[in-house]
Image: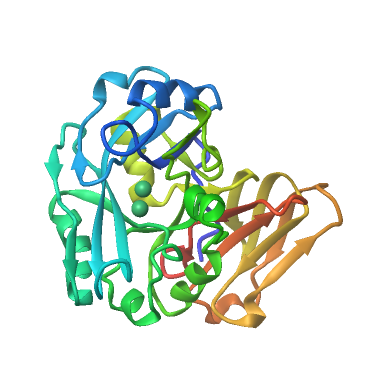
Amino acid sequence: MKDRIELLPKDRSFYKANLHCHSTVSDGAFTPEELKSMYMAKGYSVIAFTDHEICVPHTELTDDNFVALTGVEIAFGVGGKNKTSVHLCGIARDPEKTMEIPNEESDCAEAIASGVVRLRKENCISTLNHPLWSALSAETLQSLPSPDHMEVANGFEMIVDGYGTADALYEMELRRGRRFRPLATDDSHRSADGSAGPEYFRGWTVLCAQKLCYDSVIEALEKGHFYASTGPEIRGLWIENNVLYVETSPVCGIYVHGTEYRHRKAVTERHNTLCRAEIPLTGFETSDYLFVRLVDENGKTAWSCPYYFEKV
Ligand SMILES: [Zn+2]
Ligand SMILES: [Zn+2]
């Protein structure tokens, strides 16, 4: 292992992003312009507009303080109506991308697998959305080719549909050898009395990017220079001489997880008084990867990307 490895690059800025939302282009309550101003008022700099089945660029919304990512959400039904519906988000590497991918019904998991392949062919970064809401069986989940990301926290799934976060499912997949990275999103749809519904501002992804422009945001996603959160912030993350250093907003727990139970290390305090941890990685030699979880006293969580030891 090299002397010092920055897991989140030091010379970059952090940009808060909602990478899954619906506008009036499909079944969302607000126009893309309204979503931009609502999210910017909450400190966001990036939105991926991922309307159902149709990819429409909103590049006219991009300016010095905001990036509108071009995206889509596609769906594949399995096993008959209402049994399982797998949804994938695609974020286009080309901001001017347009496409339509209608919903498909099928009885075989291969059809879903083709969705991941299709997004790849369309030059999109892919995410497996709200896996608990989708009622995915272990077999269906395991038959999927790896999308680039999985939603560990989706506001709609967590709050409106009452499933909570999917981080246990995500960690089980990592242990099986699946290599995808965690996203936290809102999946914003609804309005309550004309204002944002309960799923808004529940989960976000913080991108560590060179600058606020389309290409740098895509690069941060592709390189895993980001973390997912429902509350806490990761402010610094590096390994030096086999010790993991973590700097955070005030939390009550900083944890590093690997593949086996004895790889789980934790530093905790009773209240939100912890802002830094130095965690020796002795014993992690047999782990393929590590990732960091933060928990604050309100039970809010942040997840780093998984880092694979052959790369660090
Ligand atoms: Zn969906
Ligand atoms: Zn959605």
Q: Establish if 162 lies above or below 222.
A: below
> Can the viewer see residue 147 in this picture?
no
In the image, taking residue 161 as reference, residue 65 lies left or right, namely: left
* Picture quadrant of residue 49: top left
In the image, taking residue 221 as reference, residue 143 lies left or right, namely: left
Q: Position of residue 64 (x, y in %)?
A: 38, 17
* Picture quadrant of residue 239: bottom right
Q: Establish if 161 lies above or below 175.
A: above
Q: Is residue 102 or residue 246 the one in the foreground?
A: 102
Q: Establish if 96 lies above or below 150.
A: above
Q: Establish if 81 lies above or below 59.
A: below
Q: Position of residue 189 (x, y in %)?
A: 41, 40
Please say which color scheme the image uses: rainbow
Q: Is residue 131 or residue 219 the one in the foreground?
A: 131
Q: Which residue corresponds to the image point at 54% horizontal and 38% vertical from the top-left? A: 201
Q: Position of residue 165 (x, y in %)?
A: 55, 60
